[in-house]
Image (cartoon, rainbow, N blue to C red):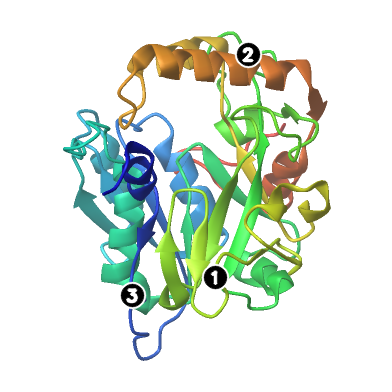
Amino acid sequence: MFGWKAKRHFTRELEITPPAPEKNRQGIAIVACVKNEETYIEEWVRFHRAVGIRHFHIYNDASTDATLQVLHDVLSPAELTVIPWKMRMRDSGSAEILNGQNIAFAHAILNFGGSYEWMAFIDVDEFLLPRKGRTLEKALQGAGGFPNISLPWHMFGHSGHVSRPPLPVCLSYTMRVSDPMRQNLDASNFKCIVDPVEVTGVSVHHFKTRNHGDITVNDAGEKFSRRKRKMSEFYSSEFIQLNHYYARSQQELQEKVDRGWSFDGSSEKYRQKVLSTIRYIEDNVIEDRRMVDFVSENAIALHGKNPVPDV
């Protein structure tokens, strides 16, 4: 008989049979769960399309703002798939809310994964910054073709902004936590890019692949187990850097706390987690202008109506 811990674990790790590769599969897709992101999603989409993302699979959690309209305005039908994803289910034994984000990721791999060489699983406040080359496809070569790549969060704080700044997010925030690998509550974690036809295990922050189990690599192709990737030796941002614009301005962070998280049953627990994380970030910041320089050097337009601003 399964105990409570087993059930809790099951909601966060799913086993799947990898999808068959389709003929002429190619390119990189992004999978993301969104809810009411009209303020930020255009910049996020334009940046990632500019660095070579072929398709966006968006799991829409009952957005009531213009999120979907923005997506359809920016992306063509060949670049966008929207899946309604209003996930509110509980485990009957433990009464725990099931992790709808994890289930969405598994759904994406099983239903769409055969079309792509790579799938990236990130949020709208996370940006995949190529460090070698102009595109993610070029940057991914650093991992040597290994099917499971883990990228550590580079967590950005307020950067002195009390209210929302006029420039795009990835140009406005340049102060991040100094050590991405230092273990402190939720200020240190990973997101992954995987070869979907090799995936056998799915979670939000880690994956398993056929013949390799939980072995993963950093962006430079160095292999570690899932647990050992937390060691400082795993750190690399030589080829790809994952920027997580966690807080944005003080005003926007408060709005984030007030909204809560869709898949967390306790609003107070979520509030405490967010506030603790931002305190840690703000107490341990360094300046990082790599994204600003990349956008400027490559003349990436983050909004259709505006040229690239001088920063």
* Residue 283 x/y as whole percent: 76, 15
Answer yes or no: is residue 300 visible: no
Query: Which residue is disc 1 drawn over?
Result: 213
- Name the residue type under label 1: Gly
- Name the residue type under label 3: Thr
Query: Which residue is disc 3 drawn over?
Result: 17
* Residue 33 x/y as whole percent: 34, 44
Q: Secondary structure at mark 3?
A: loop
Query: Is tag 1's residue or tag 3's residue first in the polypeptide sequence?
Result: 3
- Which of the two discs, 3 and 2, sits closer to the camera? 3
Q: CA distance from mark 3 to mark 2?
A: 46 Å
Instruction: Give the class, few, some or many, for how many residues have Cα within 10 Å of label 3's Cα (few <14, many ≥20).
Output: few
Q: Is residue 222 left or right of residue 1?
A: right
Query: Which residue is disc 2 drawn over?
Result: 161
Answer yes or no: is residue 235 visible: yes
* Residue 118 x/y as whole percent: 49, 70
For residue 187, which quarter of the picture? top right
Tell me whether circle 1 and circle 3 mark residues in contact (CB < 8 Å): no
From this view, report whether residue 212 is shown above or below residue 135. Answer: below
Residue in view at x 46 percent, y 42 percent: 123
Residue in view at x 72 percent, y 31 percent: 311
Q: CA distance from mark 2 to mark 1?
A: 43 Å
